[in-house]
Amino acid sequence: MSEKQTNDCLNKLSHWLEQDDISVISERYQSDSLETETETETETETEKEREKETEAKQRTKGSRLSADWVLPKEWADWARQERPDLDLRSVGEQFRDYWSAKAGSGATKLDWQATWRNWVRNQKQSYKPVDIARVTVPSSSQRDPALVKLDEDRLKTAPPNPEVLAKIRAVLGKTA
């Protein structure tokens, strides 16, 4: 091994030697001497780390929506504040039916509550029949002002002059 390679190796190892936790050093570099209390603690810590890694892997693995899913109150409260125009009972049923029927990996989610929030945000604006009537029907018994204006304009207009009508007919006859 050259001097440069030795120095590189020492620089890399110095990082490990500065660590307080011996467990970060690979087991193959540890001696085979009798087990001490520190080594036992290290093994316990290593086991805990492995458990944490297993839990982390499980958190990255999605799950399907439960077959008996019911819209939780907290989720409904959030949706009511975010979108008061929605019929939450109907939206909740659509959500459950969609995700229960969906097949494949697309039906597994890490965070179902986040999926619900996106579902609510992406719902189209819904109108109740009463709201539609308010928008399309005048609120009073008076005639619509736009219709009144059209009638007034119609009375102000006069039919075209007979000479103008003759010219129009002549132009239309030439092009036809």
Image (cartoon, rainbow, N blue to C red):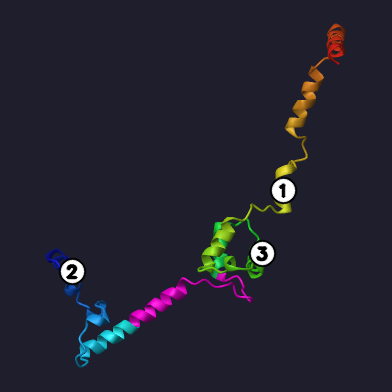
Disc 3 from disc 2: Cα separation: 61 Å
Question: In terms of image quadrants, where is residue 20?
Answer: bottom left
> Residue at the spot x=63%, y=65% of the render?
95
Question: Foreground residue, 107 or 22?
Answer: 22
Left or right position of 143 against 38: right
Location of mark 3 (residue): 94
Q: Which residue is mark 1?
A: 132
Image quadrant in which the N terminus is located: bottom left
User: From the viewer's perspective, is 26 left or right of 147?
Assistant: left
Point 58% across, 59% down: residue: 120
* Camera sees residue 139: no
- Taking the spot 20% from the left edge, 73% from the top edge, the residue there is 16
Q: Which residue, as the protein is rendered here, is positioned at the far left? A: 3
Mark 3: give few (<14), some (14-19) or many (20+) Cα within 10 Å: few
The disc placed on residue 9 is 2
| Magenta-drawn segment | 48-73
Residue at disc 2, secondary structure: helix
User: Which type of secondary structure does the marked residue at label 1 adopt?
Assistant: helix
Image x and y of residue 126, in percent: 66, 53
**C-alpha gap between disc 2 and disc 1:** 77 Å
Based on the displayed image, in which of its 4 quarters is residue 13 positioned?
bottom left
Badge 1, how many Cα within 10 Å: few under 14, some, many 20+? few
The answer to if 81 sits in the magenta stretch is: no
Is residue 83 placed above or below 162 in the rendered structure?
Answer: below
Residue 115 spot, x, y in % from top left: 55, 64
In the rendered structure, find residue 111 and report the number of the disc placed on it.
none
Residue 42 x %, y %: 26, 84
Mark nearest the camera among 3 and 1 is: 3
Up-down relation of residue 69 to residue 31 (above or below)? above
